[in-house]
Amino acid sequence: MRVGRTGGEPRRAGVYLPGVNGRGGAGRLALLLALEIARGGWATTVFTDGSVQPDELARDLGVDLSQLEFVALAGEDPRGGSLRRLRRLRTTWRHARQIRRLDLDLFVNVRFKSDLPGCGRRNVYYCMFPHRLEVDSAGRAHSLYLWAASAVERALVVRHRGGFLATYDEVWAISEFTARHVEERWERRPLLVYPACEPVPRGVKQRVIAVVGRFQAPGPNIPYKAQDVLLAIFATLTDLHAQGWRLVLVGGTSPEGSSYLAGLRELARGLPVTFVTDGSREQVREVLGEASLYWHAQGVAGDGERFPESQEHFGISTVEAMSAGAIPLVYGTAGPAEVVGGVPGVSCWRRPDELAELTRSWARASDEESEAVRQRCQDRAAEFDEAHFRRRVQELV
């Protein structure tokens, strides 16, 4: 495998994440990764789609992206139906063809549930969580259709009999939780590369419980943030309401989640609850800066054994809250439990009554006890900062 060029020409790298944005965790991770590769002297391209504006990304992220090139790939067909697999295959083929023309030395795929093959000399799949490679099918006709689509994919797009995964030289995992499932599902031993988490300045602490996460309706296998569960728990804490405690829900919205958000507002009627929808980065940082506690519930309504993808894969918002000195009370599975597991004095919860009791306990805690744990949280959060991320990426790249 040859990586590099002759005659002083810079090495060329590409990072793939259609629909990248500077507010979501995956988008921010992809952009910071691309920036770090560029800092290493690579001519770096971010492959996205036509809906992205680099200037807006730079404002959302708060960094200079001028050293990156952005290439818009062919748009995806949003239609579903019986031919959805073939339409997705056509998009994948077009993306692979566009990227291969650039003759990249390094290609990094950061897209969740991507089946795009490696398109460079050295190929890395940076994995949020490993999707299942086998697709369940009901009925003989549909099974035949999926088999035919897979055969076309291997022949025309992947160009490898072992499937798209065999085209990647390395798999990176964003957490130990993800790494375990990469080994189980893909039978690959990944390298651990924690995401870069931006520290949030600590403000004057208020009687605020913060929750950060997109407003997305629940489903049988959807990694949603369970704000409805948290609202129901908060409604029972009437003693804390009387003491001035407030719940602040921060998150992005979408047309698909509009009815869910409307239902949350109805649940919050009459309660000391504030919604910050589609807030700026500064608004999020302000909420976390003054929050005394941080709640996280992704996974509470999911089947972690049958559908581990329903759990939080890492939990950037949890780390950001800890960096601001908020004490995290997270559902005790997957990424968040991995993050807070290194903080003495912090407990996870698995039942609603446990979260309620933990919250009351911290509301009654002395300033000295709270301050000691806040400092431990900040120390732990520093282990996931950009400096650690940059060193790890440079080590591998």
Image (cartoon, grey):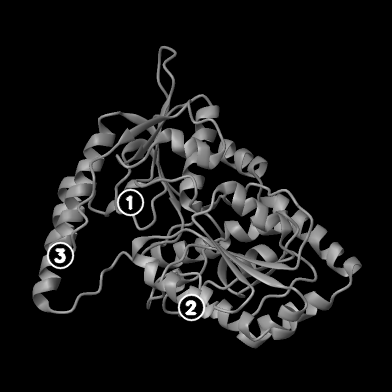
Residue at mark 3:
147
Give the secondary structure at mark 1. helix
Among numbered discs 1 and 2, the one appearing first in the sequence: 1
Choose between 38 and 51: the one closer to the eye.
51
Precedes in sequence: disc 3 or disc 2: 3
| Mark 2: amino acid | Glu
Q: Amino acid at mark 3?
A: Trp
Residue at the spot of label 1: 166
* CB under 8 Å between discs 3 and 2: no
Where is residue 63 shown, x and y percent of the image? 56, 34
Please state the horizontal and vertical placement of residue 129, each as a whole percent of the image: 44, 61
Q: Nearer the viewer, residue 275 or 382?
A: 275
Residue in the image at 31% along x and 64% along y:
133
Q: Amino acid at mark 1?
A: Ala
Which is more foreground, mark 1 or mark 3? 3
Residue found 84% across the figure and 67% down from its top: 370
Disc sitting over residue 266 in the figure? 2
| Camera-nearest residue between 30 and 255 | 255
Callout 1–callout 2 Cβ contact below 8 Å: no
Q: Is residue 32 visible?
A: no
